Amino acid sequence: MPPLRVLIAEDQVLLRSGLARLLEDAGMEVVAEAGDAPDLIRKVRAHKPDIAIVDVQMPPDHTDDGLRAAIQLRRELPEVAIVVLSQFLEERYALDLVGEDASRVGYLLKDRVIDVSSFVDALQRVARGGSALDPEVVSRMVGRRRSDDPLDALTPREREVLGLMAEGKSNRGIAEALGVTGAAVEKHATRIFHKLGVTDEPTEHRRVMAVLSLLRAS
């Protein structure tokens, strides 16, 4: 299998270089690096990497330039997976990035990079068409209550399973996290899909739609 082709968009040179070294040591190919949002868009168009890792705050405005560029690229080049890194926990950023499609997208806090194996696993999962939302963001979304919350129909365990789905974990990963069998996770997932009204789609698409239900409810 050819190495994953990665583009890194980060304006801090030392962090960008360190991230490139980390990914190359993990067997990935860093095809390009960008230091600002316009450069990111140009280089993604030119190199068409498997995945682009994008900092939220980048020049020229140093606000959410990276995020806006990532959203533009998701519309323009949906075959390029996108993982956005943020220094701060901003649920709005995750919602804006995911939009109506939770496939081939990730939103992680920069602190997650320290756990190299988990970070690399998240990149690979997103590049394969999955999703990876930071556990802290998911925890806030699952924990929030509203009077018209469509997730009220879910049991506490089903909410746990949905939260782990939102992080991008497979059924096996969910089973390991909860200390249950894969069969038990599959039963929970089936009930979640039924309660959220996403029962008539292929399995992978149902997972995406269930995650979107979580996001919209938040």
Image (cartoon, helix red, strand yellow):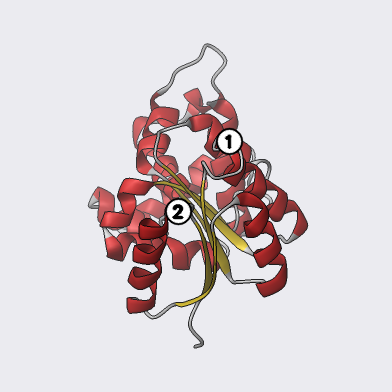
Which element carries disc 1, helix, strand or loop? helix
Residue shown at the point (32%, 60%) measured from the top left:
118
Give x and y (percent) for residue 132: 46, 52
Give x and y (percent) for residue 8: 50, 63
Seen as rendered, the residue at the extreme bottom is 1
The three-letter code of the residue at mark 1 reads Leu
Q: Is residue 137 above or below residue 44?
A: above
Q: Can the viewer see residue 117?
A: yes
The three-letter code of the residue at mark 2 reads Gly
Report the side of 193 relative to 101 (left or right).
left
Give x and y (percent) for residue 175: 31, 55
Task: State the residue in front, 164 or 19.
Answer: 19
Give x and y (percent) for residue 211: 54, 43
Task: State the residue in front, 96 or 214.
Answer: 96
Which element carries disc 2, helix, strand or loop? loop
Residue shown at the point (58%, 63%) measured from the top left:
129
Q: Which disc is residue 168 wearing?
A: 2
Task: State the residue in front, 88 or 139.
Answer: 88
Upstream in the sequence, badge 1 or badge 2? 1
Q: CA distance from mark 1 to mark 2?
A: 15 Å
Q: Which disc is residue 95 wearing?
A: 1
Quadrant in the picture for residue 210: top right
Seen as rendered, the residue at the extreme top is 147
